[in-house]
């Protein structure tokens, strides 16, 4: 645990020295919100909700998932620059390198959530939930983002360069976020896409957020969203650690 905290601190300390990453966590999400609300919002029908209320849970979930990009890029950069050799020479747990990376993502995801939520409140978003439901929604978001950090960790360890990690991550996640109920109702899609959207974990998490924050019908979405998050962590965390051990062993 102490090794993990040291690595997490190292990754967070680097952020103020990387203005481009800070922009990705602050300015870029705000741009997405404003574009969707004021450019596309008038053309999208969301029965029962103002579009800003419909959008904010979905775009926060999308942004949380993309937050894992920093893990993929950072690990790929560390591998190519030989930093893993330095870590191997230290008396530290190998798994702490990945655990520290993903733990740092929790802090940056929390910052991103706060920026998006404040922006949403300014332009008209409002909760229809108790304090407990709002807090549970935040916990779900951070857990889901943590799960995707492990997915991106595995991706970052399996590519040859940070550029490749960025491209492959975008190709893998971008379609999943848009073929979901994050930005438009799933029933507005063609039949094949609607079927995929209904089983897409992004749809399940977004529907859970709307249930917790807006009082939408929950169905199985809330417990299903937590189940998806824990399942992704259980699958990808061991795979990422195993991949890291093999990569470090070859270094």
Image (cartoon, rainbow, N blue to C red):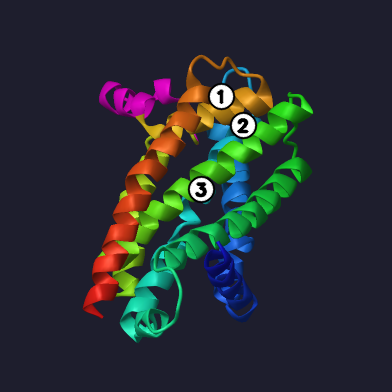
Q: Is residue 201 left or right of residue 146?
A: left
Q: Which mark is residue 145?
A: 3
Q: CA distance from mark 3 to mark 1?
A: 26 Å
Q: Is residue 150 above or below residue 205?
A: below
- Which of the two residues, 16 or 99, is positioned nearer the viewer here? 99
Q: What range of the chain is rendered magenta? A: 183-199
Residue at the image position 41 percent from the left and 44 percent from the top: 233
N-term-proximal mark, 3 vs 1: 1
Q: Is residue 165 above or below residue 178?
A: below
Q: Which mark is residue 46?
A: 1
> Tags 2 and 1 in contact by the CB under 8 Å rule?
yes
Q: Which mark is residue 220?
A: none
Residue 192 among those drawn in magenta: yes
Q: Which mark is residue 51?
A: 2
Q: Nearer the viewer, mark 3 or mark 2?
A: 3
N-term-proximal mark, 2 vs 1: 1
At which x and y percent is residue 60? 58, 44
Q: Nearer the viewer, mark 3 or mark 1?
A: 3
Q: Is residue 190 left or right of residue 103?
A: left
Q: Quadrant of the C terminus?
A: bottom left
Q: Which residue in the rendered view is the most extreme toward the left?
A: 250
Residue at the image position 61 percent from the left and 47 percent from the top: 33
Q: Is residue 93 left or right of residue 21?
A: left
């Amino acid at each position: 645990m102490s090794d993990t905290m040291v690595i997490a601190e190292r990754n967070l300390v680097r952020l103020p020295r990387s203005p481009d990453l800070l922009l990705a966590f602050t300015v870029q999400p705000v741009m997405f919100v404003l574009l969707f609300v004021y450019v596309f919002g008038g053309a999208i029908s969301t029965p029962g909700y103002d579009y800003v209320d419909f959008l904010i849970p979905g775009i926060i979930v999308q942004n949380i998932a993309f937050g894992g990009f920093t893990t993929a890029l950072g690990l790929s950069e560390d591998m190519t620059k030989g930093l893993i050799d330095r870590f191997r020479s230290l008396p530290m747990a190998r798994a702490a390198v990945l655990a520290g990376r993903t733990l740092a993502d929790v802090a940056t995801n929390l910052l991103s959530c706060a920026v998006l939520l404040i922006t949403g409140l300014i332009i008209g978003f409002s909760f229809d939930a108790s304090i407990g439901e709002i807090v549970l929604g935040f916990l779900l978001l951070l857990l889901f983002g943590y799960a995707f950090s492990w997915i991106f960790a595995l991706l970052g360890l399996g590519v040859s360069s940070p550029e490749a990690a960025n491209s492959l991550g975008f190709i893998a996640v971008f379609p999943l976020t848009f073929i979901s109920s994050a930005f438009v109702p799933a029933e507005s899609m063609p039949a094949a896409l609607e079927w995929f959207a209904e089983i897409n974990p992004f749809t399940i998490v977004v529907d859970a957020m709307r249930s917790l924050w807006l009082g939408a019908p929950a169905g199985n979405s809330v417990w299903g969203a937590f189940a998806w998050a824990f399942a992704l962590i259980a699958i990808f965390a061991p795979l990422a650690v195993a991949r890291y051990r093999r990569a470090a062993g070859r270094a």
